[in-house]
Amino acid sequence: MKPRHSRAYEFRQQFTTLFSSPEDKRLNKFYEFEINRSNLRLERVKSPSKQLEQRYITKGRRVIFNYEENLTSSLLLGYEVEETKSEDSEDSLISEIDPFEYLECIKDKILEHAEKRVDLFFYMLCAYYNQNANPVLGKTRLQHGKGSSKNNSPTTHACHSSFFPSIVDDSIFKSEKVKESEEDLFYKISLVTNTHFMDSLNSTVELPAFINEIDCMLEETFGCRKKAEKILQKVSEGRFNPVDGLKLFFLMMQNTYEKMLKSEKFLQPIKGTGFDLSPEQLIELKIKALKYMRYGTFKHKWLKTSTELNNEYIYMMLRLSPKQIKKCMKNTKTNFPKILQDKVIEIQKEILETPSAHAVKKSQNV
């Protein structure tokens, strides 16, 4: 007699298979491609427009907008340090700031940054669900927000919350040609090009430069971006629904945070803080910042002890009414009943059809 396993056990087995199996080669009428593990860039074979797509995956000028333009949910840091000057110098001193107190003061922005990463990824899963579009990471070409550098404060960066500020998919093969003089930003390289959602994927939170360094480690050194890309591809193929895709994402993030906190690669003094701290204090600051990120990632969304999604988060993201929530709660057979399926399709349509503010301005100027 076969042992009965819980859904959580079965899902963990799927998770292990997804991230331990060797890369598959996938063929379609346009091209054959394989993911380059080392640099996360796409190498296309037999592509009808190889030069064009390589341009959008590896090259390009970034278009940057100020926070004041208020086109997205981008956030300024909003933390001002009182001017403190040395008797021997006219310059303000960053050394006057207590780094751990400073980190505590910007904690809410770090949490917001981590929470937005999850929200945007879930909506990305909804946008690509059953589209068979072969999405891959592209070169970042858009940014809403700018960092700053002041004498009395740490240098800040405009940190993209999304793992995917740019995406390239099969849409690039169906695009009409554009004039060379036309802004690259408006070339149809993915399903979400020229949508408001693309602006949202390029929203930023202004944070100290050392937080951006931790982001880079999370994305590149520990491979979260590549693993998230793999989940997105499986959802696009219809092999997982967005709810299961999000669960895989949380399992991956949970494993990664645990790994980072034990890794020698991560447990090195953080660079670029501007603070005069010992190596041990810099590592402590780094760990504390990562724990804030971890808390923001799972807050109200993921039940770590049971490795289950908080259904209330899904209901909120899919904008279910109280009546629809009651129906879902009665359903114990599946985590993706028809109510949720219909809501995903509704949101997918909204994402793909709501134009970017930039595209609207462009059409008004024609």
Image (cartoon, grey):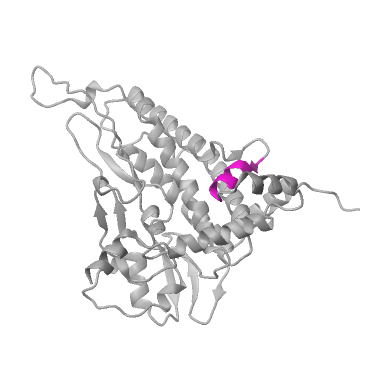
Instruction: Give the residue displayed 8% in from the left and 24% down from the top.
Output: 90
The magenta region covers 307-318
Q: Is residue 83 above or below residue 161?
A: above
Image-quadrant location for residue 27: bottom right
**Quadrant, the C terminus:** bottom left
| Residue 261 in view | no
Q: Please tell me whether residue 312 belongs to the stretch shown in magenta.
A: yes
Residue sitting nearer the eye, 242 or 71: 71
Q: Is residue 206 above or below residue 194?
A: above
Residue 21 falls left or right of residue 110 = right
Q: Position of residue 238 (x, y in %)?
A: 61, 65
Give the residue furthest to the right. 1
Residue sitting nearer the eye, 52 or 67: 67
Image-quadrant location for residue 254: top right
Q: Position of residue 143 (x, y in %)?
A: 30, 53
Q: Position of residue 26 (x, y in %)?
A: 56, 73
Q: Is residue 215 above or below residue 288?
A: below
Residue sitting nearer the eye, 163 or 40: 163
Give the residue furthest to the front. 323
Q: Position of residue 47 (x, y in %)?
A: 43, 80
| Residue 107 in view | yes
